[in-house]
C-alpha cells in the first residue's frame, strides 16, 4: 500500500480555490509568458484558466500576474514575486505534509500487515 496526499485550500465557504493544478498553471505561465499557452498546454480553456487565476487573486488578496499589453507579438504575462514565493512555499508545505502523512500511514498500515 502507498499513500497519496492531495492538498486543496478552500475559502470561508469551503470552496476550493487552490491546489497543485493551479501551481502547475502558474509554472506554465512563467514558462510560456502567456495564460492562453499555459492553459492550452494543460488542456484547459483560456476562460477557465482566467477564472481560476482571478479566484486565486481574490482569495489571497494579492496580485499574482503582471500583464503587459502591446499587441499579439509584444503582449505577455508574468507571475509576480509574490506568486514565485507562493509556489515555493506551497511545495515546501506539500513536502512537509507528505512526510508527516507517510510516517502516520506507516504506523497505521503496520496494524493490518499479515
Image: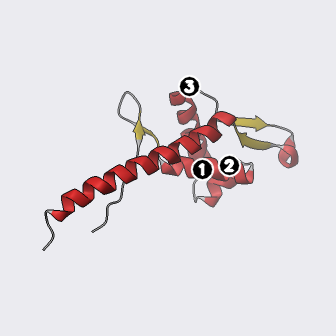
Q: 16 or 8, which lies in front?
A: 8
- The residues tagged by marks 2 and 3 sit, at their Cα atoms, a distance apart of 20 Å
Image quadrant where residue 82 sits: top right
Which residue in the protein does label 3 denote? 61
> Which residue appears farthest toward the bottom when viewing the image?
114
Q: Residue at x 26, y 53 (%)?
A: 104
Label pair 2/3, CB-CB below 8 angstroms = no
Up-down relation of residue 59 to residue 2 (above or below): above
Q: Position of residue 75 (x, y in %)?
A: 82, 43
- The residues tagged by marks 2 and 1 sit, at their Cα atoms, a distance apart of 6 Å
- The residues tagged by marks 3 and 1 sit, at their Cα atoms, a distance apart of 19 Å
Q: Residue at x 58, y 44 (%)?
A: 88
Q: Position of residue 79 (x, y in %)?
A: 69, 40
Q: Of marks 2 and 3, which one's residue comes earlier in the chain?
A: 2
Which residue in the protein does label 1 denote? 25
Label pair 2/1, CB-CB below 8 angstroms = yes
Up-down relation of residue 82 to residue 93 (above or below): above
Q: Residue at x 51, y 43 (%)?
A: 90
Which residue in the protein does label 2 denote? 29
Q: Is residue 10 left or right of residue 61?
A: left
Up-down relation of residue 95 to residue 14 (above or below): below
Element class at badge 2? helix
Q: Is residue 87 left or right of residue 93?
A: right
Q: Is residue 32 left or right of residue 90?
A: right
Element class at badge 3? loop
Amino acid at each position: 500500500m502507498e499513500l497519496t496526499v492531495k492538498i486543496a485550500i478552500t475559502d470561508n465557504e469551503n470552496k476550493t480555490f487552490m491546489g497543485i493544478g493551479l501551481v502547475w498553471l502558474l509554472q506554465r505561465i512563467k514558462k510560456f509568458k502567456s495564460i492562453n499557452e499555459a492553459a492550452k498546454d494543460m488542456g484547459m480553456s483560456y476562460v477557465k484558466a482566467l477564472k481560476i487565476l482571478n479566484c486565486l487573486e481574490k482569495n489571497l488578496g494579492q496580485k499574482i500576474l503582471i500583464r503587459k499589453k502591446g499587441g499579439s507579438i509584444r503582449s505577455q504575462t508574468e507571475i509576480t514575486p509574490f506568486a514565485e514565493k507562493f509556489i515555493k512555499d506551497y511545495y515546501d508545505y506539500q513536502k512537509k505534509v507528505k512526510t508527516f502523512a507517510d510516517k502516520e500511514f506507516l504506523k497505521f498500515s503496520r496494524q493490518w500487515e499479515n
